[in-house]
Image: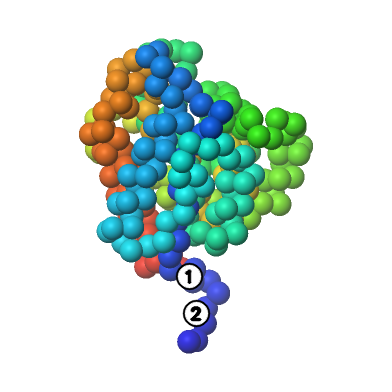
Amino acid sequence: ETQSAPSKPKPIETICIDPGHGGEDLGAIGKSKLQEKNVTLQISLKLKKLIESRTGLRVLMTRNKDSEVSLNTRASIANNQLAQMFISIHANSSFRKSAYGSETYFVSLKATDQESLELAQKENRNLEDPGETIKNDELKMILWNMAQTEYIRESSKLAEYIQNELNELLDTRNRGVKQAPFRVLMRTAMPAVLIETAFISNSKEEKKLKSEEFLDKIAFAIYNGVSKFIYYYNNILK
């Protein structure tokens, strides 16, 4: 088989789904005690099923049960298995109980706004690597040493496709595509996004997150965004 020109990326064959939190790391908790770690796993398993059944692509999971996985390990799983797409799934929370809607992130040292920065700082604290608080200089070094810098364009495109579909299907507030210094994204050598599907801290959205139908919609929206990105990546990207 002749090797294609280096400028043309290899077609996507492997996708890594990363259900946020797990084990003792509960993630955000809603008013009626719904835990983010359970919601993210449910959505991720639904998404895995959709991708496998409709595309036949290989899907990796950073966890497929209620277990704790460090941020470094999550990125390593994707990198070591040569995944070509990384999708981290989360549920949002805010001290403003009225905050609602979905948003999709790709990585950047500069956050879109203060809220995005605080969110990244919250997600970067991880029970398994408590010693790892990252100073800004170190962050810079990590970011520019990271292969993720090569994939910023693709990551922003993937985020855009997914966010458009969430907006289309979820009938909620479109909070848009944003950027923030998420550690789990910095360490991945492939197009990578982090999705904050809905606010578990908003009682209406927490109620929705308890419904299978809503979780199915989220998974389907992400799947649609992923398949549009695959088409773009395999056919259009030169």
Q: Which of the 4 quarters of the picture holds residue 43?
A: top left
- The secondary element bearing badge 1 is classed as loop
Farthest residue in the bottom direction?
Answer: 1
Residue at the image position 30 percent from the left and 35 percent from the top: 215
Q: Which mark is residue 4?
A: 2
Q: Residue tagged by mark 1? A: 10
Colour basis? rainbow
State the CA–CA distance, disc 1 to disc 2.
Answer: 8 Å
* Circle 1 crowding by C-alpha within 10 Å: few under 14, some 14–19, many from 20: few
Tell me if residue 149 can be seen: no
Q: Residue 110 at what x, y percent from top left?
A: 61, 35
Residue at the image position 26 percent from the left and 33 percent from the top: 212
Q: Is residue 5 above or below residue 235?
A: below
**As drawn, is 148 to the left or to the right of 219?**
right
Tell me if residue 194 can be seen: yes
Q: Which mark is residue 195?
A: none
Residue at the image position 44 percent from the left and 13 percent from the top: 96
Q: Residue 147 at what x, y percent from top left?
A: 63, 55
Q: Is residue 182 above or below residue 91?
A: below
Q: Which of the 4 quarters of the picture holds residue 236?
A: bottom left
Q: Residue 40 at what x, y percent from top left?
A: 42, 35
Q: Amino acid at mark 2?
A: Ser
* Circle 2 crowding by C-alpha within 10 Å: few under 14, some 14–19, many from 20: few
- Marks 1,2: beta carbons within 8 A: yes
Number of residue marks:
2
Residue at the image position 33 percent from the left and 55 percent from the top: 51
Q: Residue 188 at what x, y percent from top left?
A: 59, 51
Q: Which of the 4 quarters of the picture holds residue 32?
A: top left
- In front: 76, or 231? 76
